[in-house]
Image (cartoon, rainbow, N blue to C red):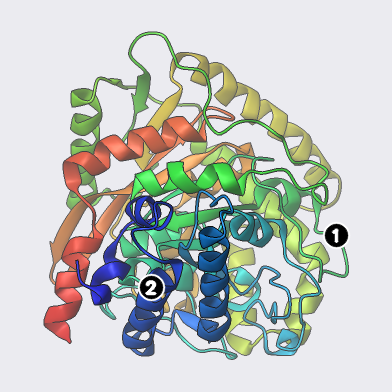
Amino acid sequence: MTHTDIWRLTATDLTALTRSGDLSAEDAVQSAVDRMHQANPGLNAVVEDLSAEALERARALDQKRTQGAQTGPLHGVPVTIKINVDQKGHATSNGVVALKDVIAPDDAPIVRNLQNAGAVVIGRTNTPEFSFRADTDNPLHGRTQNPWGRHISPGGSSGGAGAAVMAGIGALAHGNDIGGSLRFPAAANGAVTVKPGLGRVPAWNPSQQTERGLLAQSMSVQGLITRSAADLHLSMPSLIAADPRDPFHVPMPWRGAPMDGPIKVAFTKDTFGYALHPEVDRALDTARDALNDAGYQVEEVSPPDVFDCGRTGYRALMGEVLTLLKSDIEAAGSETIRDIFDVYFQEFPPILGTELLQVMAKRSHYAREWSLFMQDYPLVLSPFLPQPFFKPDRDTEGPEGVHEVLGCAVYSYAMNFLGLPAASVPARLAELPQGPQPINIQIAARQWREDMAVDAAAAIEARVGHMCLPLWQNMEERA
C-alpha cells in the first residue's frame, strides 16, 4: 500500500501498524488529512480543519513511542468530532449562528477518552441546527453532501460524521444519537455504528450553561460511526472509560459473558402499515440468512409493540422540547428549522403537564416488556427504515416530508426511549433509478450488550462486505 492509500485502512488495520512501529502516526494522520483536502470540498462534511494541530499531535505521539512510552489502543488513528460536543479551544456551535463563538473551556468526556487512547482529531464535522434533523444543513456551515451522490441525504444529525468516515476522512467519526442521529447517517452512507445503551458512554459538555431535560439525558448517547464492525470492537472500550463528570455513567466492561448455546434472534419485517420497499425486504433476508449461517438461531417473531413505545416516547420528547427548547429555537433558529419544528409538533403532538409525567413513568413498563422478551431473544433484527433513504431536504416538504423522514422511523427512536443498544449495518447495495444507495438494517440488543449487537453486525458484514469499497469506486468514476 502506497503512502497515499493509508487512509483506506480500517482503524483495526491501522493500529496494527502504528503500534508496532511499522507506520508512524504522522504518516497515518498525513494520509487522512490529504484525503480530507481531496474529498471534503465536494462534501462539506468537515467544517473545521484541524490539520495543523493534528500533525503536531501525531509527531508528539511518535516521539513518545520512540522514547519507550506505551501506545494506546487507538495510537495514531485519525478521527473527527461532531461540532455539538466540546473540544477545548474550539466552537461548540451545534450548527447555530448564534453559538458560533461558544468556545469550549475543556474537552467533553468522549473527546478526552479518544485522545487518551491515542486518537488524533483531524477535524470537526457538520450537524443541522440544534442537531435535531435527520438531514444535515445549517445557515452557519451550509449543506453536507452524501458521498454516494446528491440524490441521497447524508442523514443527520451526525451527517457530517457519516459522510466523512465513509469518504475516507478519518477511520473513526464521533457522533451522538437522541432519536437516531448515529443510525440515520450510518444508513444514509452505508456505515456501521452502534447506538450505545443508557449510561454506557460518559457525556457532558463543559460549555453548557444549564442541564438538559430528563428525557434528553436518558435518550441521548455518544458513539462512533465506522467503516467496519471490527473497528467498533477496537474503539468502544476506550469510549466507555469512566469520567466523574457524568454521575450516571455505568462502569461495565465492553464484553459481556458468553451465552450458552445458539443466540436467538427475533426477526421481524413489521413496518406498522408503512410500505416495505422490495430492496429493504431483500436486505432483511440477506441479514437473516447471514446470521443463520453464522450460527445464530433466527426466528420470525414479533417483539413488544415498538410502534406504541416509539411514538409515545417521541411525543414525550417533543413535550420536553416544547417546554425547554422552543424559545431558544424561536430566538436563534432559522426560518427553516422553525418551520420543521412546527411540523414535528404536528407529526408528534407534544405530551405535556401531568400526562408527560405519566408517560415518563410508563417508560419503565415499555422497558420491562422488552427486558422480559430479551431473556429469550437477546437480539432483534428489524428494518431501520421501511424505505430506502430519503432525498436531501425531504423534511422541509411539510407534513408528508416529515412523515417519511421521522414518522416511520419507530425502530429508531423506540430504542432511545427504552435505553437499549442498537447497531446499524449495511445489508445491501440497491441500484435504484436515482442512483446506487446502501440499505442498512438494525440489530437491537439487550441492555449492556452492545458487543452482541456488533458481533451480529460483523456476521452480516462478512456476507455483504465493506460498503466503502464500492463507494470509493463510485466516487472515482464520478470524479
For this rendering, which residue is in front, 457 or 429? 457
On screen, 112 above or below 265?
below
Number of marks: 2
The answer to which image quadrant residue 146 occupies is bottom left
- Please name which of the two marks, 1 or 2, marks the residue nearer to the observer: 2
Residue 149 appears in the figure = yes
For this rendering, which residue is in front, 24 or 190? 24
- In terms of secondary structure, where does tag 2 sit? helix
The answer to which image quadrant residue 266 occupies is top left
Q: Position of residue 409 (x, y in %)?
A: 45, 52
Which amino acid type corresponds to the residue marked 2 in the rendered image? Asp
Give the residue displayed 13% in from the left and 71% down from the top. 433
Give the residue displayed 19% in from the left and 49% down from the top. 465
Which amino acid type corresponds to the residue marked 1 in the rendered image? Glu
Q: Residues within 10 Å of mark 2 (few under 14, many from 20)?
A: many
- In terms of secondary structure, where does tag 1 sit? loop
Q: Position of residue 87 (x, y in %)?
A: 69, 71
The answer to which image quadrant residue 463 occupies is top left
* CB contact under 8 Å: marks 1 and 2: no
Q: Which residue is mark 2?
A: 27
Give the residue displayed 43% in from the left and 68% down from the top. 155
Which of the image's four quarters has the N terminus?
Answer: bottom left
Q: Which residue is mark 1?
A: 211
